[in-house]
């Protein structure tokens, strides 16, 4: 109503004096007299100020007389106690403890490779053999000598038991037999190193050397990479402020965005060391990998339940404003009438943790309070509003 009166007044004023003003202004401009033009400008500005003051007085009176003015329309909801489960969100990296490079234990020529990339192998399976460089022949000779030494020792032992011969002959035969036995065992130990075995059940991820290659123990001499994808786990760095809430056996929601896969797990291990460079500690979360799709170094997202409030008051973050003192406030409605009109009242609140688009209110908002939702940022304290909830 107020706006209509204002428009009518301005329109009539414009019609009544517009013609004269335009003609008068054009006439002054046509004189090219700077003094007259400046004087006319001052005259018009003075009249403009007078009109603005008059309009202000009219609007003030209209506000006082108009009992049918429209109240701002808002929607509300009632604050209620709910279970609030907060999750700490982290990014982790998939690892496996059984992901190793297999090196030769002795130098030689790689005689044969018995596996290929992608092949599943069992623990102890023969992966490759190294040319033994004549160790087999040495072993055969030593075994023959050891057998002769054993026969000689056993005969000397029988004779010594019958008090025949000297003790020195018996001891020499015994020492010779033991020395030959140790030599055989030593050669066998070296010969075993010419066979490269699988250290655990897994999959051959890479074959680095071809048959005929000269290899030797040491850096850069790896022959295979073998990986076990059944025992995977995720590592993540947790900020130190969560050290009291992120503990062993806490439930974790794990998602793999690339795979579109979600699984549930628990924290298996929490590090006892705080990294001084980034003030964080490490956790391990095991994950099952029956399909084999989860690979080492794959990125994972973790949601750890670090806080739960069984009687929390939650409100949308979008309805919260902040005053000049940095205090957060919302609007609630009071004195609601049958015609749905009520009074908006500003309430300063204390907030807690957020999750998604909601935030926990810790103080000054009891359950059952009717909170302004739509229109929360356009109402004023003490203003009459109309609630239009469906």
Image (cartoon, helix red, strand yellow):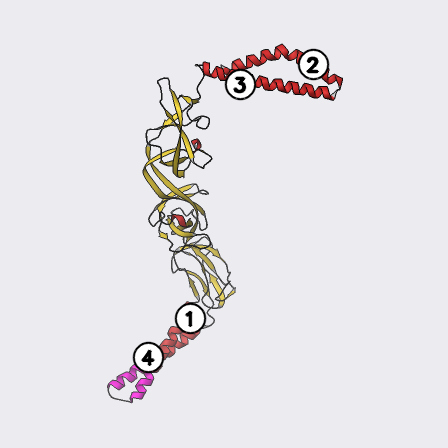
Query: Foreground residue, 37 or 88?
Result: 37
What's the residue at 49%, 17% (across, down)? 60
Q: Which mark is residue 56?
A: 3
Measuring from the top left, give residue 141's x and y in whole percent. Answer: 41, 76
Provide the residue designation for mark 1: 190
For disc 4, the neighbor class at 10 Å (few under 14, some 14 to 19, many from 20) is some
Mark 1 secondary-structure assignment: helix
Give x and y (percent) for residue 109.
Answer: 50, 66
Marks 4, 1: nearer the viewer: 1
Question: Which marked residue is nearer to the observer: mark 2 or mark 1?
Answer: 2
Q: Earlier in the sequence, mark 2 or mark 4?
A: 2
What residue did someone put label 4 on?
A: 150
Which residue is the site of mark 2? 24
Q: Which numbered disc covers residue 278?
A: none
Q: Earlier in the sequence, mark 4 or mark 1?
A: 4
Q: Is the magenta stretch mostly helix, strand or loop?
A: helix
Is residue 244 placed above or below 13 in the rendered structure? below
């Amino acid at each position: 109503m107020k706006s209509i009166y204002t428009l009518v007044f301005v329109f009539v004023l414009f019609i009544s004096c517009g013609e004269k003003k335009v003609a008068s202004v054009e006439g002054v401009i046509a004189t090219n007299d700077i003094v007259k033009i400046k004087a006319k400008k001052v005259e018009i500005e003075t009249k403009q100020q007078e009109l603005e003051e008059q309009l202000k007085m009219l609007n003030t009176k209209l506000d006082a007389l108009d009992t049918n003015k429209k109240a701002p329309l808002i929607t509300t909801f009632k604050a209620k106690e709910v279970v609030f489960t907060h999750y700490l969100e982290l990014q982790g990296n998939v690892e496996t403890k059984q992901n190793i490079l297999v090196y030769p234990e002795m130098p030689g020529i790689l005689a044969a490779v018995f596996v290929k990339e992608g092949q599943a192998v069992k623990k102890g399976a023969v992966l490759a053999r190294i040319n033994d460089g004549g160790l087999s022949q040495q072993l055969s000779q030593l075994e023959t000598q050891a057998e002769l030494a054993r026969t000689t020792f056993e005969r000397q032992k029988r004779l010594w038991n019958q008090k025949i011969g000297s003790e020195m002959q018996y001891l020499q035969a015994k020492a010779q037999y033991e020395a030959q036995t140790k030599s055989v065992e030593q050669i066998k130990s070296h010969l075993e190193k010419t066979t490269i075995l699988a250290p655990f059940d897994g999959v051959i991820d890479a074959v680095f050397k071809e048959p005929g290659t000269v290899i030797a123990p040491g850096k850069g001499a790896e022959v295979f990479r073998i990986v076990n994808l059944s025992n995977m786990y995720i590592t993540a760095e947790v900020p130190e402020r969560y050290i009291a809430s992120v503990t062993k056996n806490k439930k974790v929601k794990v998602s793999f965005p690339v795979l579109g896969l979600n699984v549930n797990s628990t924290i298996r291990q929490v590090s006892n060391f705080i990294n001084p460079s980034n003030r964080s500690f490490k956790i391990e979360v095991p994950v099952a990998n029956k399909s084999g799709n989860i690979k080492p170094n794959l990125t994972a997202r973790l949601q750890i339940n670090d806080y739960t409030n069984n009687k929390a008051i939650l409100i949308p973050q979008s309805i919260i404003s902040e005053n000049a003192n940095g205090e957060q406030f919302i609007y609630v409605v009071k004195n609601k009438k049958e015609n749905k009109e009520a009074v908006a009242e500003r309430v300063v609140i204390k907030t807690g943790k957020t999750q998604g688009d909601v935030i926990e209110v810790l103080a000054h908002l009891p359950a059952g309070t009717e909170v302004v939702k739509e229109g929360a940022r356009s109402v004023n304290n003490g203003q009459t509003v109309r609630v239009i909830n469906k």
